Amino acid sequence: MDLPKRKPTRLKDYDYSSEGAYFITICAHNKQCIFSSVVGAIHESPESVLNENGKVVDDIIKKLNDRFDIIIDKYVIMPNHIHLIVVIDENPRAIRESPLQKRSLISKAMGYLKMNASKQIHKTIHNQKVWQRSFHDHVIRDERDYLKIWNYIDSNPAKWNEDCFFI
């Protein structure tokens, strides 16, 4: 049986361990709302209120800065996805690996987040599939792009019912 060929999601020949800022989106499996609820009236400032699964994800995100040479500059955990701005400023601890084992710093950090969140969530909900495969990334190209994404993340809960991931 021939499986459909997956469309590459990364920029060809781009080093995702190089200095820069990256906008990352990771979706829950089948876009299930398993991390939070968006609450607040329209005239208030709606916010994403984390459930137990969301708190697990939040704790791991907060520890990524210590585990990897990255800075999580901004993030939001929505009901069925998360958005992050990940900054690689300098990379003194980076170990250059053989081409056969090459995985970027971004891929390693996101894999760590997904794997550890899944392990913790499986302790209470045994067969819960947590994450959609892979993640979406965007290399932030300049300050204007950065500010646009920062504002998008900041306003994401208020625009939840207009979000492409809204279910």
Image (cartoon, rainbow, N blue to C red):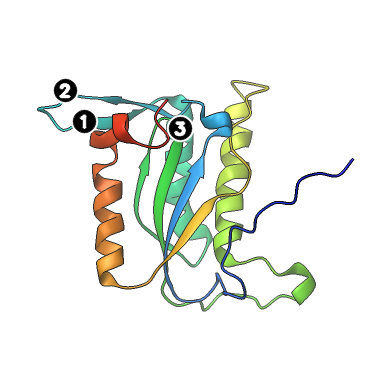
Q: Position of residue 155 (x, y in %)?
A: 24, 43
- Element type at mark 2: loop
Q: Earlier in the sequence, mark 3 or mark 2?
A: 2
Q: Which residue lies most toward the right here? A: 1
Q: Please give the name of the residue rendered at 25% of the width and 46% of the height, measured from the top-left corner.
A: 154
Q: Please give the name of the residue rendered at 46% of the width and 32% of the height, measured from the top-left corner.
A: 80
In the image: residue 87, left or right of residue 129 = left
Of residues 18 and 58, the one drawn nearer to the viewer in this rendering:
18
Which amino acid is tagged 3?
A: Asn
Which amino acid is tagged 2?
A: Ala
Classify 10 Å Cα crowding around label 1: few (below 14), some (14-19), many (20 and above). some
Please determine whether, in this image, residue 35 is positioned above or below residue 96. above
Q: Position of residue 134 (x, y in %)?
A: 61, 49
In the image, which disc is placed on residue 46?
Answer: 1
**Residues under numbered marks 2 and 1 in contact, where contact means CB atoms less than 8 Å apart:** yes
Q: How many marks?
A: 3
**For the residues marked 3 and 1, what is the alpha-carbon distance in whole angstroms?**
16 Å
Of residues 67 and 97, the one drawn nearer to the viewer in this rendering:
97
**For the residues marked 2 and 1, what is the alpha-carbon distance in whole angstroms?**
6 Å
